[in-house]
Amino acid sequence: MFHRRLGLLTDHDYRALFAGTTAGQLGHQVSQLALPLVAVLALRANEFQVGMLMASMTAAFLVVGLPAGAWVDRVRRRGVLIVTDLARAVLLLSVPAAWWMGTLTMAHLYAVALLLGVLAVFFDVAYQSYLPHLVGREKLVEGNAKLESVRAVTQIGGPALGGQLVQWLTAPAALVADAAAMMLSAMFVLGIRKREPEPERKPGAHLLREIREGLSFVVRQPLLTRIAMCTGWFNLCSSVTQAMILVFLARDLGISAGAIGLLFTVEGLGGLLGALTARRFAARVGQGRAIWMSVAFTAPTALLLPLAQPGWRLWAVAAAQIVFAAGVVVYNVNQLSFRQALTPDHLLGRMNATMRFFVWGTMPIGGVLGGVLGELVGARTTVWIGAIAGCLAFIPVFLSPLRSMRDMPSGENIH
């Protein structure tokens, strides 16, 4: 009974990936809070500069999003995970080093954010393409749900830890903890025993041709294009909001870094709730329905975010964000498992990279837009705009066969 509840966690290799993901996600949560706070608190950046920093953190999905998939499909994915973890640790350490030497600038932060984004592209594409090999297609929903639970748990502990580290050590010094977590993640992935076969290189293989194959596969699959439209619009709107949320909370409302971290921690409870219920919810309503319902029913709770004020209103908003975060995780578990099941093995890297290009490529646009709007109309109004627009994200998947679809398709049936 106990082993049945643990499921994939009884498998050594999945457990190593799970542990590595836990360490990496914990560090990621710290840096997501600490890096913008370096700009806001240490360098006194204005709204547009903060928006540009947030855009820099995701611009890589537009720059290398498509070729990353073709490159990842050419190599063993485990090695990509290890190298990107170690490289991110080095980059993160450069920020406190420059700050201690008195040479830290916004240009340095932009460069670090952009390069971290490049490495994140390769890590995410490799990890999403590695999972079907590690657990098998029949266990994808369980595998993704457990990894999303890690993300949710670190969203509970990470921001609170990050907020306290910023208060105790200053924002630049808090990034040392993130670097240590990335190194620990690489060590766990090194412990995976199962080796992938060397990817078969076709005669006359060409990078541009391989990129076109990935693009063509996604564009010819109407279910994938609808998911891309939904996720891309949602990420655009969320990035508009995220570009100004720290300015809104820290500067406009005067909330401390520790309280901001605690606010994001409360939101993380919703992510954990979503991870624990995603598989059960999909089994009850059908996976296709779970994809659109999870967005349509929870996105409107973000409308309470711009109503935040110091005191009880702030924690009322936090309670609403629990619902919002749960919906995001239920959506992510089911749409990712859906995409992986739909795609043949040899195209997994390119499919994931192409989808990331479309759905994360909107994030730097949202970051710049959020920064511009913040300068023109203020942080609170910008948060309003992002929240209202995000309520429309479910429409593309609702107006598709996913509206009534129950079962996952199989990559074996794709021609």
Image (cartoon, rainbow, N blue to C red):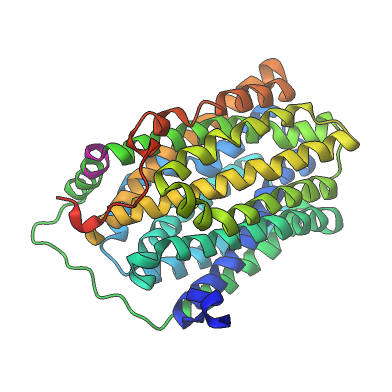
Q: Give the magenta-colored segment's residue range.
A: 217-221
Q: Nearer the viewer, residue 365 or 386?
A: 386
Residue 182, percent from left and from top:
58, 66
Compared with 381, 67 (above or below) is below
Residue 69, percent from left and from top:
32, 53
Residue 337, percent from left and from top:
40, 55
Residue drawn at the location 76% of the way across and 42% of the way down: 319
Report the side of 88 relative to 93 (left or right).
left
Residue drawn at the location 55% of the way across and 76% of the way down: 6
Give the residue furthest to the front.
284
Residue 228, percent from left and from top:
39, 38
Dividing the picture into quarters, in which one does residue 277 lie?
A: bottom right
Report the side of 350 relative to 139 (left or right).
left
Confirm whether residue 63 shows in the render.
no
Magenta stretch, main secondary structure class: helix
Compared with 101, 388 (above or below) is above
Compared with 55, 338 (above or below) is below
Instruction: Judge whether residue 325 is colored magenta.
Output: no
Give the residue furthest to the left.
203
Instruction: Judge whether residue 220 is colored magenta.
Output: yes
Confirm whether residue 113 shows in the render.
yes
Report the side of 209 relative to 122 (left or right).
left
Give the residue furthest to the top.
376
- Which quarter of the rendering shows the N terminus? bottom right
How many marks overall?
A: 0
Residue drawn at the location 52% of the way across and 78% of the way down: 4
Report the side of 118 relative to 261 (left or right).
left
Compared with 260, 373 (above or below) is above
Residue drawn at the location 43% of the way across and 39% of the way down: 359
